[in-house]
């Protein structure tokens, strides 16, 4: 069983009672787990699985695939503050989507985990802003090694990744002109 610090970046319903949870971890990178029975009212996961929650997870590795079994969750960062503003929630989701599109599953990326943690902590304490958006994109481009001195980070990321998440357009509209 593996134990690591993790941030929940996506939740998908698997069955009537179970969820697939995508986590971004420093030790294992992007990890997908199934939380069996998580949708039951008396589940040990009740109230512990939501977007942007951060804490420590334990999971058992799958023998043949990339969908592992979630065993335990201990939440340390609830990040309730970023849920108070739609713009903050949208920017947090954009950061998670962008990061997820930039990494390979189960490839250790401690610097990227730290970047996401810092971004979410910032959005938990302060309102979303164009400056926060640009800072995340600039740091991500730098850490991925795709930044160029003469072009904005979003252009470098779009060129490297093929596209940027569609939510970026709404973010720009909500946060104001560049």
Image (cartoon, rainbow, N blue to C red):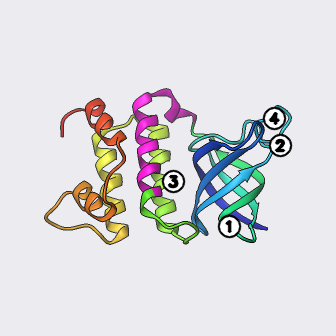
CA separation, marks 4 and 1?
25 Å
For marks 4 and 1, the one nearer the N-term is 4
Looking at the rendered image, the quarter that the N terminus falls into is bottom right
Q: How crowded is mark 2: few (under 14 residues within 10 Å), some or many (20 or more)?
A: some
Residue 99 included in the magenta stretch of the image? yes
Q: Position of residue 147 (x, y in %)?
A: 26, 67
CA separation, marks 2 and 3?
25 Å
Residue 139 lies in quadrant: bottom left
CA separation, marks 3 and 1?
27 Å
Residue 154 included in the magenta stretch of the image? no
Q: Select label 2 or label 4 by which is in front.
A: 4
The magenta segment is: 80-100
Q: Is residue 107 left or right of residue 60?
A: left
What residue does disc 3 label? 117
Rendered image: mark on residue 44: 2
What residue does disc 1 label? 65
Q: Which residue lies furthest to the right in this view?
A: 42
């Amino acid at each position: 069983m593996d134990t690591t610090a993790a941030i929940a970046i996506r939740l998908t319903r698997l069955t009537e009672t179970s969820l697939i949870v995508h986590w971004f971890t420093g030790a294992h990178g992007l990890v997908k787990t199934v939380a069996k029975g998580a949708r039951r009212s008396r589940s040990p996961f009740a109230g512990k699985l939501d977007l942007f929650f951060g804490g420590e997870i334990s999971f058992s590795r799958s023998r043949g695939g990339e969908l592992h079994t979630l065993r335990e969750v201990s939440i340390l960062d609830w990040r309730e503050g970023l849920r108070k503003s739609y713009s903050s929630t949208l920017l947090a989701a954009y950061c998670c989507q962008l990061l997820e599109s930039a990494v390979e599953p189960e490839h250790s990326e401690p610097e990227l985990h730290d970047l996401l943690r810092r971004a979410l902590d910032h959005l938990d304490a302060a309102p979303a802003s164009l400056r926060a958006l640009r800072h995340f994109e600039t740091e991500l481009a730098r850490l991925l090694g795709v930044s160029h001195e003469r072009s904005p980070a979003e252009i470098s990321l779009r060129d490297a990744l093929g596209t940027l998440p569609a939510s970026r357009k709404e973010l720009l509209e909500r946060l104001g002109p560049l």
